[in-house]
Amino acid sequence: MGIFQQTSMKNPSRRQFLKTTLGGAAGLLLLPVIRPARLLGAEAPSRKIQIAQIGCGRMGRSDLGNVLTEPLARVVAVCDVDARRLAAGQGMVEEYYARSGEAGVKVQTFADYHDVLASPAVDAVIITVPDHSHALIAIEAAIAGKHIYVQKPVTYSIAEAIALRRTVEAKKIILQTGSQQRSERPWRSFRRASEAVRNGRIGQLRTIKIGIGLDTASGRKPHPAPAPANLNYEHWLGAAPEQPYVEDRVHPQDSLGGRPGWITTEDFGLGMITNWGAHHVDIAQWAMGQELGGPLTVDARAEFPVNDERTVHTTYHVEMGYPQQVRLILDNHFATGLRFEGDEGWVFCTRSEDISADDNPNVSFSRESRLPLQASDPKILAPLDEHAIRWQPSKSHYGNWLESIAANRQPIAPIQQSARSLEACCAAWISMKLQRPLAWDAATESFTGDAAANALRGRPARKPEYDHALAMKRAGIA
């Protein structure tokens, strides 16, 4: 797959080390110089990948908590447009290092992500901001030469996904999408089920039934108010359409936890179809061998609230037709998870920290079982032989990203595949909005002969400074 090469630098500086081991995602596959922390001694921080966390809210703190424990990671900076969240992120990192025996560690803080990207002290960024800002920040990070971990859905729109993929490829950046269901921890059930399907354990795949949860209307009207002094609302709004500040459509000011309002506001995220859909459709396309493809047809129906704080879809029914006559169905009545049905049986996977069938050989395989991994026959989940198709080893999703940077290889959830999952979910949303079936061409990443549908693949930026296409043009990327 590549040429392995061992560096001969005896005691390189951090910048020399990164230049040697991280140079060019499309180039040689290099053996990392990074060694276990116990071998690094006093110079350990300089030998690690230096990371900045962009976005320190609920999920940002989750990402921070996960990456801080990774041996290859050193968090050196945090960034947020909300001063309260910025301070909380800084405190979280400094307290972690203090508990680890490093007294007096100071983490840089930034209110503007552009300053993060301009810092030579930062090698990689984790982007955990609302969906509508994923693309611009990630594209500018790639242009700046920073490696990227970006939460799912990887972008807000189809056009943004294509643009981000092109930029990452042009700049030879390692990008990991936060589709952690592809990794073993904490939910290996998705890997087991999708490998079984990909290897024909249920015969010819016919139907995939997916439940992604349900948003409901709040029953409350939006209440505009002045933005709080600690929040740079102009920068938070970014490329989204101009609108007054509504706390319940941004994030709570009295806590760091809880589900933020932007996630149920269509200008900032498209609802469960991309929120959880990005997770489960990704696994479905992985299992059926369409991780670089997509549906042929999309027919979706959904309800949308009127004059409500929440504007994303509520109930939904989506049917997508894939090659080999596979039918994918999403419905709000289905249990959360994926059920793969074939000519010779079925397998179901969902999230849980409970035991799986692999942990307990005496598990019941009935449809009523609530275990995270179920099948119509235990043989479906029996160990695969040496000739089987297997996914890339990945216990920790964050560790896989860091190891991929060091080894100069694609991670388990690269942009080339997450862009395709996003496209399928967005195609379903577009069908919901137009209330009619659509024909999707995965080769051209567009709808066949449908100007109205193609117009919804993207949206204009509110101001030029938030236009990802202009950022790409300035960088010389088509």
Image: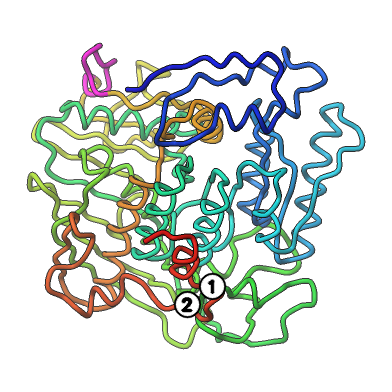
Q: Tell which of 443 and 223 is nearer to you.
A: 443
- Give SS at disc 2: loop
**Residue at 41% of width from left, 59% of height from top?**
477
**Residue at 66% of width from left, 25% of height from top?**
71
| Spot occupied by residue 465 in the image (x, y as percentages of width and height) | 56, 74
Return the residue at label 1. 466
Of the residues shown, which amino acid type is indicated by label 2?
Ala
Relative placement, left or right, of 37 versus 436 is: right
Disc sitting over residue 461 in the figure? 2
Few, some or many residues within 10 Å of mark 2 (<14, 14–19, 20+): some
Q: Main secondary structure of the magenta part?
A: loop
Q: Which residues are magenta?
A: 379-389
Above or below for 398 versus 78? above
**Is there CB contact under 8 Å for labels 2 and 1?**
yes
Above or below for 180 versus 260? above
Identify the colour scheme used.
rainbow
